[in-house]
Image (cartoon, helix red, strand yellow):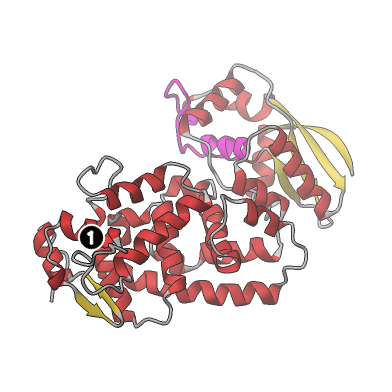
C-alpha cells in the first residue's frame, strides 16, 4: 500500500464532493450515524482551530476518491456548510466566518494511491476495530464486503418485504442492527437454534459458502417472511411484543417448524400470541408460563437454552395434543394449563386446529377484553 500526505482546505473537500470526485459510501462504509451534539462539537473544534484527525481516501484508477476513514466528519462539514444545522452556539454557517472555515482551516489527508480492494477493506477494518468505533455488524460489513453471506444479508435488509414489517427504528438501522439480526435469522435456517452468535461468526469465515447456496437460503427466508407479512396485515407486528428481537427470533423459529400447516392455522396461532402478549412479563406472578417465557427473553436471552425454552412455550401453547390438559393426571403440558387457568378458560372450550387442541381466540378475546379481531 502506497500513500501521499496532502493538505486540503475544507473548500477543497467540499468542492471535490460536490463535483462527484469523492464517494462517501463505498461498500464497506456505514451510513450517517453521528448525533447532532457530536456534529456540533466537531464544528466547534474547527472554529477553535483545533486540528482534526487525518482523513484517509483511496484514489482509484479513474482519479476519484473513496472515503476510507473520515466519512462522519466529512458529512458533518458538508451539512454545516449547507446550512442543515447551526453550531453549538446556534450560529448558522451564513453568519459565521466563512472565509476562515472554507479557505484557511486545513486538514491532513492521506491519499492512498496503490492498494488492492482487499487491502483497503482490511485497512478500514483495522482502523475502526482497534479504534472501537464500529459495532459488530459494521465490522462484519467492512471485513466481509461483497461476500455471498454479506450480500445476502444486505439484499434482505433492502427488500420492501423486510422493510414493511417495521422491526427497526431509523436510529438502529443507521447502525446496521438489522444486518446483525438478519444474520441470526438466516443462522436458524442453516444451523437451527444455536448459542449466541458464534455460528454466524464462523459462517462468515466459511469460504465454501457460495452464491447458489445464498440464493437458496434467500428463497427459504422469504417463504417464512411471507407468513410474517400476512400476520402484519392481520395485526401490526410493531404494536406487539413480537417486534422485539428475542420474541421475533422465537416466532421465526416456530414458523420454520410449522410450514406444513395451513395458513389459516398459523393465523389462528398468531392471534392467540397477540391477545396474550400484554400479559407476558417477568413480574407476572399469576401465570408461571408467562413469567418464565418473559424471563427467558431478558436473562441470557441469546443462549441456546433460553431460545429453546421460548420455543417450547410456543409449541406447548399452540401445538398442544392433549385434549383435556387440566384433568389429565400426568399434566404433561403445564404451559397450556397455566394459561387456561390464568384466563379462567375451561378445558372444554379448547378448539381443534388441524391436529392440535388449542385456545379459542373468540373466547380469549372476551376474557382479555382486547377486541382486535372480527369474526
Quarter of the image for residue 277 reads bottom left
Query: Height in image: 91 above or below 344?
Result: above
- Indicate the position of residue 60 as horizontal and vertical percent values: 81, 53
Quarter of the image for residue 112 reads top right
Query: Height in image: 51 above or below 60?
Result: above
The one of 74 and 132 positioned closer to us in this rendering:
132
- Indicate the position of residue 30 as horizontal and vertical percent values: 61, 48
Single out the residue that lies furthest toward the front.
Answer: 329
Quarter of the image with the N terminus is top right
- Indicate the position of residue 84 as horizontal and vertical percent values: 46, 38
Q: Is residue 343 left or right of residue 23?
A: left
- Magenta stretch encompasses residue 215: no
Name which residue lies at 46% across and 23% down: 88
Name which residue lies at 42% across and 55% down: 309
Query: Height in image: 371 above or below 63?
Result: below
Name which residue lies at 35% across and 59% down: 313
Q: Examine the rendering and report whether any part of residue 167 can be seen.
A: no
Query: Height in image: 195 above or below 361?
Result: above
Quarter of the image with the C terminus is bottom left
The one of 244 and 254 positioned closer to us in this rendering:
254
Q: Residues within 10 Å of mark 1 (few under 14, many from 20)?
A: many
Name which residue lies at 47% across and 37% down: 83
Label 1 SS? helix
Q: Examine the rendering and report whether any part of residue 161 can be seen.
A: yes
- Indicate the position of residue 63 as horizontal and vertical percent values: 81, 52
- Magenta stretch encompasses residue 79: yes
Magenta stretch: give its range.
Answer: 72-94
Q: Residue at label 1?
A: 337
Amino acid at each position: 500500500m502506497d500513500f501521499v500526505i496532502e493538505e486540503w482546505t475544507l473548500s477543497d473537500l467540499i468542492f471535490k464532493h460536490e463535483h462527484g470526485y469523492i464517494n462517501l459510501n463505498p461498500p464497506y462504509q456505514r451510513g450517517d450515524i453521528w448525533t447532532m451534539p457530536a456534529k456540533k462539537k466537531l464544528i466547534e473544534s474547527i472554529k477553535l482551530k483545533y486540528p482534526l484527525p487525518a482523513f484517509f481516501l483511496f484514489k482509484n484508477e479513474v482519479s476519484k476518491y473513496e472515503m476510507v476513514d473520515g466519512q462522519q466528519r466529512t458529512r458533518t462539514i458538508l451539512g454545516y456548510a449547507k446550512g442543515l444545522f447551526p453550531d453549538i452556539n446556534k450560529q448558522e454557517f451564513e453568519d459565521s466566518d466563512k472565509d476562515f472555515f472554507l479557505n484557511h482551516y486545513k486538514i491532513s489527508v492521506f491519499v492512498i494511491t496503490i492498494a488492492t480492494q482487499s487491502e483497503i477493506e482490511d485497512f478500514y477494518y483495522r482502523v475502526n476495530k482497534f479504534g472501537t468505533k464500529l459495532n459488530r455488524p459494521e465490522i462484519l460489513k467492512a471485513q466481509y464486503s461483497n461476500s455471498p453471506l454479506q450480500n445476502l444479508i444486505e439484499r434482505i435488509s433492502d427488500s420492501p418485504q423486510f422493510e414493511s414489517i417495521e422491526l427497526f427504528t431509523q436510529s438502529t438501522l443507521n447502525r446496521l442492527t438489522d444486518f446483525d439480526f438478519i444474520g441470526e435469522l438466516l443462522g436458524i435456517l442453516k444451523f437451527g437454534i444455536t448459542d449466541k452468535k458464534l455460528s454466524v461468526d464462523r459462517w462468515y469465515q466459511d469460504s465454501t459458502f457460495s452464491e447458489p447456496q445464498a440464493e437458496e437460503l434467500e428463497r427459504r427466508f422469504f417463504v417464512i417472511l411471507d407468513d410474517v407479512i400476512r400476520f402484519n396485515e392481520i395485526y401490526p407486528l410493531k404494536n406487539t411484543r413480537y417486534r422485539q428481537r428475542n420474541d421475533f427470533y422465537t416466532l421465526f423459529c416456530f414458523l420454520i417448524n410449522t410450514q406444513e400447516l395451513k395458513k389459516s392455522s398459523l393465523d389462528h396461532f398468531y392471534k392467540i400470541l397477540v391477545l396474550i402478549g400484554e400479559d407476558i412479563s417477568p413480574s407476572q406472578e399469576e401465570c408461571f408460563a408467562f413469567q418464565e417465557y418473559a424471563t427467558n427473553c431478558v436473562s441470557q436471552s441469546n443462549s441456546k437454552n433460553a431460545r429453546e425454552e421460548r420455543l417450547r412455550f410456543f409449541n406447548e401453547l399452540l401445538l398442544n395434543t392433549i385434549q383435556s390438559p387440566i384433568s389429565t393426571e400426568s399434566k404433561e403440558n403445564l404451559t397450556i394449563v397455566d394459561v387456561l387457568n390464568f384466563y379462567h378458560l375451561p378445558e372444554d372450550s379448547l378448539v381443534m386446529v388441524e391436529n392440535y387442541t388449542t385456545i379459542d381466540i373468540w373466547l380469549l378475546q372476551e376474557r382479555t377484553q382486547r377486541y382486535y379481531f372480527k369474526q
